[in-house]
Amino acid sequence: MAAILTLGILGALLGLGLAIAAEVLKVEPDKRVQDIEKLLPGANCGACGYPGCNAFAEAIVEGEVKNLSVCKPANEKTYKEIIKYLKDHPDKDGNVIKVEK
Ligand code: SF4
């Protein structure tokens, strides 16, 4: 009986610890990734060198991408929309991600 009680309490404490850790260590996704992905053609063709449009959008937000023209299915309008979006949506510190067409 004592062993069952001990394991039950231990399980509850570990579960509580995991729940607290999940809340404290939670990383909020950057909304800009989803927004930029919506602006991309959505072909998920990989021509940009990334496994899909979401990965390309992440790379843009992380500052890895310097030239949007690597996305071949996109057109001038798409490039301009993304550049405008990035200008209008700086990060928390006010830094604007700079990319070219
Ligand atoms: S090239 Fe453009 S359409 Fe193709 S996966 Fe990359 S971002 Fe998406």
Image (spheres, rainbow, N blue to C red):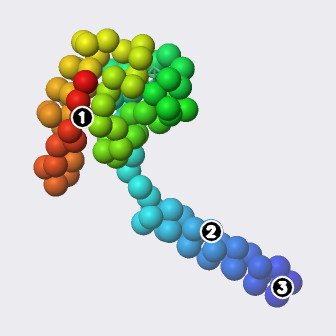
* Residue position marked by numbered label 3 in the rendering: 3
- Residue in the image at 41% along x and 17% along y: 72
Residue 47, given in percent of the width and then of the height, sits at 50, 23
Is label 2 in a helix, a strand or a loop?
helix
* Residue position marked by numbered label 1 in the rendering: 99
Badge 3 or badge 1: first in the primary sequence: 3
* For residue 34, above or below residue 64: above
Rounded to the nearest angstrom, the CA distance separating label 2 from label 1 is 45 Å
Crowdedness of circle 3 by 10 Å Cα count: few (<14), some, many (20+)? few
- Residue in the image at 43% along x and 33% along y: 56
Label 1 lies in ligand 1 vicinity (Cβ under 8 Å):
no
Crowdedness of circle 1 by 10 Å Cα count: few (<14), some, many (20+)? some
Quadrant containing the N terminus is bottom right
Left or right? Give the position of 11 relative to 77: right
Q: Looking at the image, do the residues carrying marks 3 and 1 touch, with CB atoms under 8 Å apart?
A: no
Q: Looking at the image, do the residues carrying marks 2 and 1 touch, with CB atoms under 8 Å apart?
A: no
- Residue in the image at 21% along x and 47% along y: 91
Quadrant containing the C terminus is top left
* Residue position marked by numbered label 2 in the rendering: 15
Q: Looking at the image, do the residues carrying marks 2 and 3 touch, with CB atoms under 8 Å apart?
A: no
